């Protein structure tokens, strides 16, 4: 019989690939053909994605609270149905308002079906021992961009942009829904753990001469562990928001920014495409070398990778473009894991889902604003916009240094 943790990681990881394909990676494929067919500006399609992120931000705490009360399986299964409705509606859209309405539905699907809810579902099942499972999910989901763009571009070439929407709607119902249905229930995980514990023979204590001696009295450290404060939550939310703003901004504008640093545009696109594999590399580094560390330590190191890469690029120019992209991707990949593991290590399991919703709310607002604000800064400053991302990355590192590793949640 498959272990519950392997079943949960495998099913949830593949389901996250499907969820991301119909959310984050959809606009890049359908924006141009949809705008041409509907007679709209491509900006309307990207504005719709910002609407989806905003709706997701507001609905996130509610989705997290549902996971705390019901477990992750029903919430994730509900997300597949909402995604299917939203994608079907988008495929039938005929104008501005129908596009925005469809994206608002997709925002509800994102609130109930992306990483934050997946992490909450895993923590609801496995508690404090969830770090490896969270890393495993992000490793599988690291292939989302490759799968989503490859499949979506092929479907669009055969059936148009509406066909892409309807294709992923069908995949959500036919594949994503059954996969999320495989997620174990909290009761079944507890029953399996109890059965394992009962099957393990208890060691029989054998008396020894030393056992008759009085126990040695050792002084106990009665100093209570510090309790995380509201300020800790604000600092953590800022770190995730700053990372999301930089990541989304660079996802849209990195090739042009590298071109301004002296990299030929075709090569800039090739180098920029290495962000995804670098993120997977970062997750592998976290799994093999950092998983026994406190998540705060690994997150601090990850937060430094972008400022380090940006410094090298600003000083030495185009020859260090590849180094910058790899460092940025590695750090971003580790911080995505930290979104699940860092709140767990600082605040504990109680109310984890709802807390995740609140912590990620500024992050989603930052993602929604990043394409416009980062693009505005790039228009005015050119490649010097890299100083903006450097500043945000360094401020995130400072914020992490203000959070103590001594917190011990109950």
Image (spheres, rainbow, N blue to C red):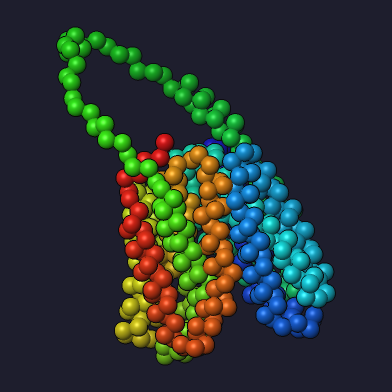
Q: How far across and down, in percent of the image, does residue 155 sit?
A: 72, 71
Q: How far across and down, in percent of the image, does residue 225 sit?
A: 32, 39
Q: How far across and down, in percent of the image, does residue 90 sit?
A: 77, 68
Front in this rendered view, residue 36 or 268 = 36
Quadrant of the rendering where the N terminus is positioned:
top right
Q: In the shown orientation, is residue 66 left or right of residue 293?
A: right
Above/below status of 4 relative to 293: above
**Can residue 173 be seen?**
yes
Above/below status of 299 relative to 153: above
**Can residue 5 be seen?**
no
Front in this rendered view, residue 99 or 236 = 236
Give the number of callouts.
Answer: 0
Residue 205, by quadrant, is: top left
Q: How far across and down, in percent of the image, does residue 372 sit?
A: 58, 78
Residue 370, by quadrant, is: bottom right
Residue visible at 51% across and 29% down? 193
Residue visible at 54% across and 81% down? 375
Quadrant of the rendering where the C terminus is positioned:
top left
Residue visible at 52% across and 24% down? 195
Residue visible at 24% across and 32% down? 221
């Amino acid at each position: 019989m498959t272990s519950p943790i392997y079943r949960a990681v495998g099913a949830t990881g593949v389901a996250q690939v499907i969820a991301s394909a119909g959310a984050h990676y959809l606009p890049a494929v359908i924006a141009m053909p949809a705008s041409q067919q509907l007679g709209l500006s491509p900006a309307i399609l990207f504005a719709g994605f910002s609407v989806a992120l905003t709706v997701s931000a507001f609905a996130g705490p509610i989705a997290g609270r549902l996971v705390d009360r019901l477990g992750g399986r029903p919430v994730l299964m509900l997300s597949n149905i909402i995604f299917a409705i939203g994608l079907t509606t988008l495929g039938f859209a005929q104008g501005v308002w129908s596009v925005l309405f469809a994206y608002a539905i997709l925002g509800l699907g994102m609130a109930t079906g992306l990483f934050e809810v997946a992490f909450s579902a895993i923590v609801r099942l496995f508690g404090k021992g969830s770090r490896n499972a969270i890393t495993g999910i992000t490793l599988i989901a690291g292939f989302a961009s490759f799968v989503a763009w490859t499949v979506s571009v092929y479907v669009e070439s055969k059936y148009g942009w509406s066909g892409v929407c309807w294709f992923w709607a069908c995949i959500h119902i036919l594949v994503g829904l059954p996969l999320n249905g495989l997620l174990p229930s909290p009761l079944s995980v507890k029953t399996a753990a109890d059965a394992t514990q009962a099957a393990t023979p208890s060691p029989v204590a054998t008396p020894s001469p030393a056992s008759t001696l009085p126990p040695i009295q050792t002084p106990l450290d009665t100093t209570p562990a510090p309790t995380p404060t509201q300020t800790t939550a604000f600092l953590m939310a800022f770190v995730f928001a700053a990372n999301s703003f930089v990541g989304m901004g660079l996802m849209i504008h990195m090739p042009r920014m590298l071109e301004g640093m002296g990299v030929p545009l075709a090569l800039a696109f090739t180098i920029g495409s290495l962000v995804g594999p670098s993120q997977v590399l970062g997750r592998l580094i976290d799994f093999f070398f950092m998983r026994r560390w406190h998540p705060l330590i690994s997150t601090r190191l990850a937060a430094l990778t972008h400022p380090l890469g940006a410094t090298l690029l600003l000083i030495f120019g185009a020859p260090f473009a590849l180094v910058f992209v790899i460092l940025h991707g590695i750090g971003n990949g580790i911080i995505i894991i930290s979104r699940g593991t860092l709140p767990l290590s600082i605040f504990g399991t109680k109310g984890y889902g709802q807390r995740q919703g609140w912590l990620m709310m500024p992050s989603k607002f930052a993602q929604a604003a990043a394409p416009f604000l980062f693009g505005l800064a790039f228009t005015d400053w050119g490649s010097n916009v890299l100083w903006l991302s450097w500043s945000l990355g360094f401020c995130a590192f400072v914020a992490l240094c203000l959070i103590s590793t001594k917190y011990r949640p109950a």
